[in-house]
Image (spheres, rainbow, N blue to C red):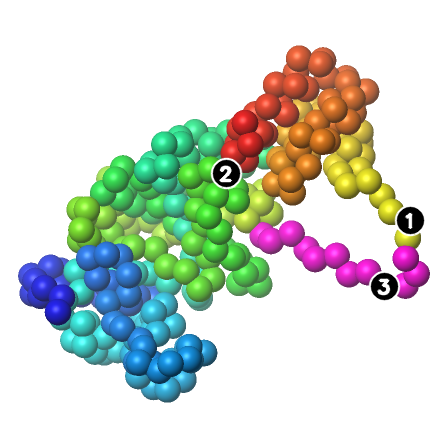
Amino acid sequence: MATIDRHATALALAHALSAAERGLAVIPLSRTKLPALRSPHHEQPEPTPCHGECGRPGHGVYDASTDPRRIRELFAAAPWASGYGIACGLPPHHLIGIDLDTKSGTDASAALRELALRHLFTIPATVVVVTPSGGRHIWLAGPPDVVIPNSAGRLAPGIDIRGAGGYLVGPGSRTEHGVYSTVPGTAQLPPGACPPALLRLLMPPPRAHHTGPSKPQVQPGQGLVQFVLAAHEGQRNTRLFWAACRAYENGIGEALSGELTDAALRVGLTEREARSTIASAARLTGHA
């Protein structure tokens, strides 16, 4: 049975209720950062696709609520809870969490800065939470008509995304490794609006729908090459970096690097500049 620390539970509940007052739906978490309440269907031999329709608690992020009475009921059912999770993707904030990890040995903060420079966006003033391991969670508000999926390392090594169906560990939570806290001066800020350029990077790529007669086969990556060839002065390096990142993400980075370099030379970059940019893309996507 989980150890009960009533003081930690009371603090977690207080923090959770405070978050709910700001429109953030919450659930109780255990010291392992997992939902504190076990699924009511755990003894069934086959997985049950229930998101709370049964009326019982224990459905993870689907239990999340901003109702103080409901939150107290959830914590009362989990007296061993020492933290709380904040559900992402729900109104009114449609929260997106940028999780900058430090445990993987990568510099996720530097990777995010490089992405910001390459794609010309700035992280707005917003809530920033420091994790016990030294990582950071950046809270951003998404638009109501866009669903951002969860991902791990897709944006860059060490950068995980918490979107719809995911949750962030709330500040004030106590875990096995320590306490989550806000960066001074950010606790009372509202989640800043996600920059459009970053939002485009977070969205899943559209699925191609093929209708009508089949077309001649095109070599993989030719669209990326054409994207670079269409670059004007002032956007050549940015377009090359973007195209190279997409190529590496799709497993054709090495095969396409020569054609991307040739395209970059044709639009005015030097060979050294082109190779350096492609190498940066390889590093950022974990293919260096």
On the image, numbered disc 3 is attached to which residue?
Answer: 211
Gap between marks 2 and 1 measured at Cα: 34 Å
- SS state under label 1: loop
Tell me whether circle 2 and circle 1 mark residues in contact (CB < 8 Å).
no
Residue 141 visible here: no
Q: Nearer the viewer, mark 2 or mark 1?
A: 1
Q: Name the N-terminal-most of marks 2 and 1.
A: 2
Residue type, numbered disc 1: Pro
192 or 73: nearer the viewer: 73
On the image, numbered disc 1 is attached to which residue?
Answer: 216
The stretch of residues the image draws in magenta is 203-214
**Snapshot quadrant of residue 6:** bottom left
Q: Name the N-terminal-most of marks 3 and 2.
A: 2
Task: Classify 10 Å Cα crowding around label 1: few (below 14), some (14-19), many (20 and above).
Answer: few
Residue 124 locus on image (x, y percent): 44, 41
Residue type, numbered disc 3: Thr
